[in-house]
Image (cartoon, rainbow, N blue to C red):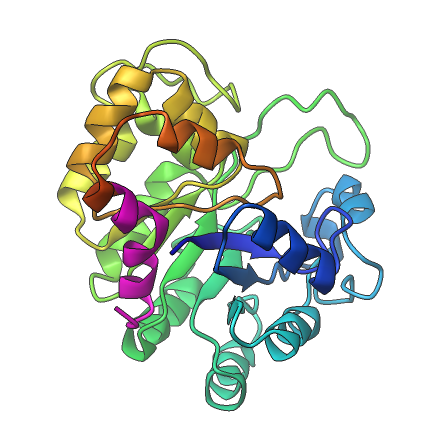
């Protein structure tokens, strides 16, 4: 079995049927289909070319209605996620209703220009912990994007320190770290200026330190940030995946097969592969 623990509705030209065809092509049984709610002035408008106009609403680039459409069209293939902006006064009520009416099982993706330990966010995380929903967060620093308009760059989440504070305050909630501002901290020499650092991994990475300290932290291995973090040093990747085999989830955030190709090249045991490919995902949504 294979579960893609991070993808989106109407993402990069894929409608629901094309998404399922892509899943079949790469042997993926289920996908966590996640929203991205954000005010219009808090996300890079360049993303709009990658979403369906029917998905883009006043709530952000990827709305809940479109993700719900995927889950209702192929109920056996999609696990429904929803991350209402926790700063909205109706956010917890909306999530509670979505859990009861539509079977939401993941709070994600949270990708906002908001400190991850914002008091409103902490209340949301604790609610997710009570309901058994894992929380998927995106972290980006003020990387050089070589643009000037409308903003020179877009940070999300406030960095690894804000994320750590949130994790520490919510021990009953399971978190999945994702994106360049999370995965680049796999190496101890990270300078918080480069989105996709390369070269051998140096001991002392903040990500590794946090995995050792917080049992409620998991790794969403999606996108170029996740795959690149391990591909930069395959020898380290084997050690990392062996040590943290219970804390890493296969995920894509796209529609290629780079992650499977690399993972299958590492000669890991079938037991480790099963955990990364699907058992850890099932455990987090209480289906194992």
Quadrant (top left/top right/bottom left/bottom right) for the C terminus: bottom left
Quadrant (top left/top right/bottom left/bottom right) for the N terminus: bottom left
Main secondary structure type of the part rendered in magenta: helix
- Report the residue at 43% width, 63% height from top: 121
- Report the residue at 74% width, 53% height from top: 14
The span shown in magenta is: 273-288
Residue 141 percent across, percent down from the top left: 52, 32
Q: Is residue 161 left or right of residue 98?
A: left
Q: Is residue 120 left or right of residue 208?
A: right
The image quarter in which residue 177 lies: top left
- The vertical placement of 108 against 253, above or below, is below
Q: Is residue 172 magenta?
A: no
Residue 287 percent across, percent down from the top left: 30, 72
- Report the residue at 54% width, 45% height from top: 26
Q: Is residue 286 magenta?
A: yes
- The vertical placement of 7 against 245, above or below, is below
């Amino acid at each position: 079995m294979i579960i893609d623990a991070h993808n989106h509705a109407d993402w990069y030209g894929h409608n629901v049927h094309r998404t399922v065809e892509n899943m079949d092509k790469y042997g993926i049984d289920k996908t966590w289909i996640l929203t991205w709610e954000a005010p219009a002035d808090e996300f890079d408008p360049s993303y709009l070319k990658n979403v369906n106009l029917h998905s883009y609403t006043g709530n952000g680039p990827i709305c809940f209605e479109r993700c719900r459409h995927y889950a209702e069209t192929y109920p056996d293939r999609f696990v429904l996620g929803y991350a209402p902006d926790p700063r909205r006064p109706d956010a917890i009520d909306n999530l509670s209703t979505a859990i009861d009416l539509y079977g939401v099982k993941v709070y994600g993706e949270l990708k906002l220009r908001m400190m991850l330990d914002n008091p409103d966010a902490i209340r949301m995380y604790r609610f997710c912990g009570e309901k058994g929903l894992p929380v998927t967060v995106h972290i980006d620093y003020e990387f050089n994007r070589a643009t000037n308009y409308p903003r020179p760059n877009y940070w999300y989440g406030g960095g690894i320190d804000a994320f750590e504070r949130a994790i520490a305050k919510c021990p009953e909630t399971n978190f999945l770290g994702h994106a360049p501002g999370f995965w680049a901290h796999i190496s101890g020499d990270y300078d918080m200026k480069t989105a996709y650092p390369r070269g051998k991994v140096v001991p002392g990475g903040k990500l590794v330190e946090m995995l050792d300290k917080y049992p409620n932290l998991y790794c969403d291995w999606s996108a170029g940030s996740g795959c690149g973090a391990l591909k930069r040093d395959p020898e380290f990747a084997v050690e990392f995946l062996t040590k943290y085999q219970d804390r890493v989830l296969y995920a894509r955030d796209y529609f290629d097969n780079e992650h499977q190709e690399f993972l299958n090249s590492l000669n890991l045991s079938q037991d480790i592969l099963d955990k990364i490919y699907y058992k850890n995902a099932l455990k987090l949504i209480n289906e194992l």
